[in-house]
Image (cartoon, grey):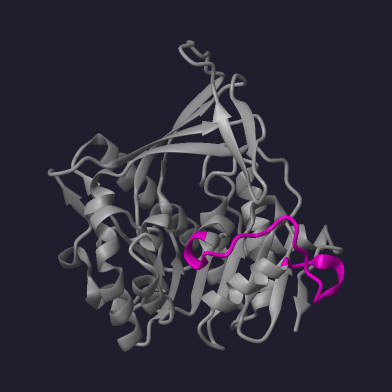
Amino acid sequence: MFDVITVGSATLDAFIETDEANIVSVCSTNRKKDFMAYPYGAKIEIDKFDFKTGGGAINTATNFAFLGLKTSTIVKIGDELQGDNIIRTLKSAKVDLANIIRTNMYQTGFSIILTSFQGDRTVLAHRGANAHLEIDDINFDAIKESKWLYLAPLNGYSTKILDKIAEFAEEHNVNMAINVGTSSIKQGKEYLYNILKTAEVVILNRDEASMLTGIEVRPDTKTEQYSKDLIHTDIIRMLKEINSGKLKITIITDGKNGAYAFDGEIFYYCPEFPANVVSTLGSGDAFSSTFVASLEKTGGNVEKSLMYASVVAASVVEHFSAQGGFISFDEIEKRLNKNLDYRVYTIK
């Protein structure tokens, strides 16, 4: 029996950093968009590069295991050297390997991560085998015996099996957390909402929440209902729409602005924990998996779980890779004790 099984993508990531990356902002009346730009036709000098294993299912599985949970993962990888690297990473992290699918029909997923001087990144992704996870690849017997099922974003054909996995978890009383991705949202609101209503935890970032609900966070609208403008009115609208019941916890992450949550009764605002940002890649996976692990550890304490998740995410962004900053629960407590003013704000 596992504490958690993750399902999602596995990739080999090439991290590239150069001071030649420019940030270009484009504004309109109701939105602002930032672009990473390089001189057209130029040869750009690379200041730093590295190869690491990544992907939502791998990043979360290794963090779950680091936090002491008995963990397995269901991913599809190629039968080549890139796939071997992922196996070695998981084995070193003490993640169970029994549910990994290897194929010679597709290559292991591959990503190029372009990092800016601000620490943010743009990802060029080749989905490879990640886009071809099939229902016959899923070990439902293992899921049935697990306490938690964590669904990381899926892509391509793989998104079409989400509903069947969610239905199975619901039927067998397996707690499910889902990190919503854009490919799943593109399957349609009705399809995705039928999946979300079966989950105990739903996590997505602000752009994904806007894409799913059709609600834009308007710069000319503020929160009039609550003091201190802790949660924007439009984010409150998003949280209410996505949350389908009292027992569901919905979280919207918002980068350096922190994270917002709603459990059907209480709104939570969790500020960003202090960090010296090197790269933001993997911070979302670290936040999400730590939140779920903390719920299990604290018996469902949302406020404390948000704080724990923010501390680990802050640790991860101080490293160049998505798995470089994992810390234990003991270390999380030490860092919180050094920042006694750090807190989560609750609004009823």
Specify the quadrant that holds the C terminus.
bottom right
Magenta extent:
211-232
Q: Is residue 315 left or right of residue 160?
A: right
Which x, y percent locates residue 4?
A: 41, 71
Count the numbered circles shown: 0
User: Toward the viewer: 295 or 131?
Assistant: 131
171 inside magenta stretch: no
User: Toward the viewer: 3 or 170?
Assistant: 170
Which x, y percent locates residue 105?
A: 13, 44
Which x, y percent locates residue 277?
A: 68, 40
Name which residue lies at 25% across and 43% down: 128
Question: Quarter of the image holding residue 228?
Answer: bottom right
Q: Main secondary structure of the magenta part?
A: loop
Question: Quarter of the image holding residue 312?
Answer: bottom right
Q: Is residue 273 left or right of residue 261?
A: right
Furthest residue in direction front, as rendered:
29
User: Toward the viewer: 335 or 273?
Assistant: 273
Is 85 drawn above or below residue 96 in the view shown? above
State whether residue 187 appears in this view.
yes
Which x, y percent locates residue 72?
A: 35, 64
Furthest residue in direction left, as rendered:
105
Specify the quadrant that holds the N terminus.
bottom left
Name which residue lies at 35% across and 84% down: 170
Is 107 drawn above or below residue 335 in the view shown? above
Name which residue lies at 57% across and 51% down: 283
Is 78 drawn above or below residue 333 in the view shown? above
219 inside magenta stretch: yes
